[in-house]
Image (cartoon, rainbow, N blue to C red):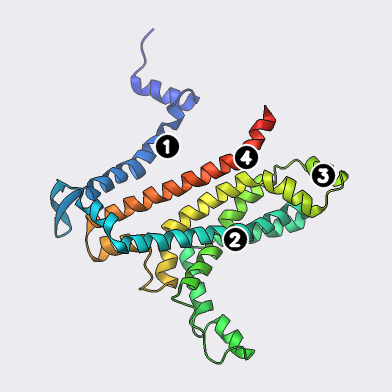
Amino acid sequence: MTRRPLLLRLVDELLSGRGIWPAVPAIVVLVVVAVIPFGVLLSLGFSDITVSRGVIVSQEFSLGHLATALADPLYHITFQRSLTLALTTTLVCALLGFPVAYLFLIGGPWTRRIILVLTIAPILTSGIVRTYAWIVILGGRGVVNATLMEFGLISQPLRIINTHWAVLIGMVQIHLPIMILPLIAVMSRHDSRLEEASANLGASRLATLRTIIMPLSVPGLGTGAALVFTLSYTTFVVPQLLGGGNYLNAATMVYEQVVYSLQWSKGAVTAMILMATCLAVLLVFAWLTHIATRWTRVAQR
């Protein structure tokens, strides 16, 4: 028998779905769009570079930028603000998203369709468009101020836009569907017989919600919290547009250092700190979810 060329054998393995070969295209894309850029980011963050006309002309290894960033009070304040904003957004999304997911669980077919449409429709619209909509709503002559003045509740427009509260409102509205969808997915897999058994044993609907539905919904809550926190912690558009030019968070700091100041090494260090702290919080979320769902693994043994 003649031995087939290596390329044909690789194509056959890829199409047959055997071994690791089906994952090769995804691995290649991941290396190109994530691993290589991250390597470039590391090289910039741990080096002193000289830039001339947008081109790096010299590069030497250095830890000075990282040490300066860790000792700079501005970094501490900025990352504390970003972390507080992201955690607050995650908490508010969880408090607002869980009732919606629960209504989807107990609602009829038409209720479920309406909830799905209202949840998915905002995702189909660009976040920039939704952010500009909030500028119109929260502006000095926006819908909120106009309504309050029409009813005589205020005598002059409130300053809502370009504040922390405007950023928080925009973040919650934009990221709320990301919390609702994992909760719906997990709640839809609940065994309805558990709720029937709880009701037959005399438990009220509130007791069933507290003892049956909420514990079973922890995986969806953990997934939604991780997604919302990641998006809120690393977001750039919402703080930049709703917070105004003076609202500084970690993502806008990276943008200003790289685009305006052309301090690529400082921007790379800031981006690495942003990624490291985000990963640390996600690990905490994963650990808390693991602790909260430990009883399910014990029950399966």
Residue at x 38% of width, y 64% of height: 249
Separation (CA) of disc 1 from disc 2? 29 Å
Residue denoted by label 3: 198
Q: Distance between the residues labelled 1 and 3?
A: 45 Å
Please tell me which residue is depicted at 49% across the width and 78% down the height of the picture. Answer: 160
Mark sitting earlier along the chain (4/3): 3
Q: Nearer the viewer, mark 1 or mark 3?
A: 3
Residue bearing the label numbered 1? 26
Q: Name the residue under label 4.
A: 293
Q: Quadrant of the N terminus?
A: top left
Q: Position of residue 185 (x, y in %)?
A: 64, 46
**Horizontal arrangement in the rendering, residue 285 relative to residue 180 (left or right):** left
Lower position in the chain sequence, tag 2 or tag 3: 2
Give the residue number, with chain letter if any, for mark 2.
121
- Mark 2 belongs to which amino acid? Ala
Task: Please say if the residues under marks 4 and 2 sit with CB atoms less than 8 Å apart.
Answer: no
Estimate how packed mark 4 is, as few (under 14), some (14 to 19) or many (20 or more) residues with alpha carbons within 10 Å: some
Kind of residue indicated by mark 3? Ser
Residue 175 placement (x, y as % from top left): 53, 59
In front of the other: label 2 or label 3? 3
Callout 1: SS: helix
Q: Which residue is drawn at 61% across and 47% down?
A: 220
Report the residue that reaches farthest toward the top.
Answer: 1
Label 3, secondary structure: give it: helix
* Secondary structure found at label 2: helix
The disc labelled 1 sits on which kind of residue?
Answer: Ala
Q: How far apart are marks 2 and 3 (CA)?
A: 35 Å
